Image (cartoon, rainbow, N blue to C red):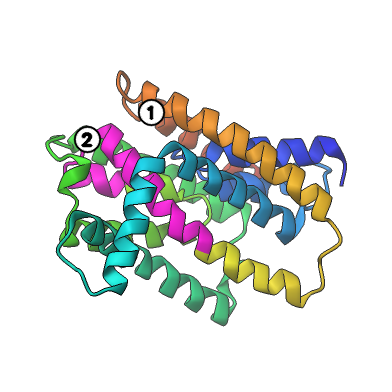
Amino acid sequence: MPLFQILLVALIQGITEFLPVSSSAHLILLPELTNLKDQGLTIDVAVHLGTLVAVIVYFWTDVKKLCYGALELAQFKKNTSSALLTFYLIVATAPVVIAGLIIKVVGFDSTLRSVEIIGWAMIVFGIVLYWSDQKSTSKKFFQQWDLRSAVILGLWQALALIPGTSRSGAVISGARAIGFLREDSAKLAMLMSIPTIIASATLVSVEVVSNGDLLIVKDSILAAFFSFITALVSIKLMMRFLRYVSFTPYVIYRIAVGLILLIIAYS
């Protein structure tokens, strides 16, 4: 694969993975709207793993707490703050894993990857993001995450299996709707991405290995590295940005892109 395309895919993934604008939609649309060849599953896995490392590095303190929590749960210690945080994360991940497996088994994953569906999802869930962001009373902090919130956000995250919805956008919408602050909503979305990306990457990796697609290791390493750097910068900028501005700019972008995609789909 040309170095230019590797860089382009890595930049798109790194910038959009944690913004509420749908990284998967942009990756699907890249070959759809250009003359570039589809980057393939292996590169998709690589850039997702790059963004995974970025969120782990940025939230290392919280990730260490999650690791301690996993050890405590393994020892049947359920009442510590670390164990509860890890347990809530597991609960929040379950809906998207179950729904993803069902979609994969019945073969809906290919059906959903259309420009028309992505366009409508960009617009509809952009409006949902605007509504939840403006409606929110913004009283809850990250530390107030509980079992009820984990279940609710897990269901919101499952909606992101529709291309164009945006996993982070769906979680942020849900978090804002139940009263979490903007920065804390974004933090929840990013932490919830860790097990979700691991689960999806594992599922796709099995398919890649079974197909014998192991000849682009060098391209994959480059793609993962560049997406890691881009995602790390993107996370830092967004977290600073949210201290002063709402999610409205992202909503405007989503609707604009959605309208363009619908014009393309119906023309």
Magenta extent = 172-198
Q: Is residue 161 visible?
A: yes
Element class at badge 2 = loop
Among numbered discs 2 and 1, the one appearing first in the sequence: 2
In the rendered view, would you say 78 is above or below 182? Answer: below
* Secondary structure of the residue carrying numbered label 1: helix
Q: Quadrant of residue 99?
A: bottom left
Q: Spatial distance from mark 2 to mark 1, Cα to Cα? A: 12 Å
In this view, the residue in front, 71 or 219, is: 71
Which residue is more in the foreground, 113 or 160? 160
Residue pointed to by mark 2 = 181
Overall secondary structure of the magenta section: helix
The location of residue 230, given as percent across then percent down, is 60, 32
Q: Amino acid at mark 1?
A: Met
In-image side of 213 versus 241 (left or right): right
Task: Please give the label number shown on residue 239.
Answer: 1
- Residue 21 marker: none
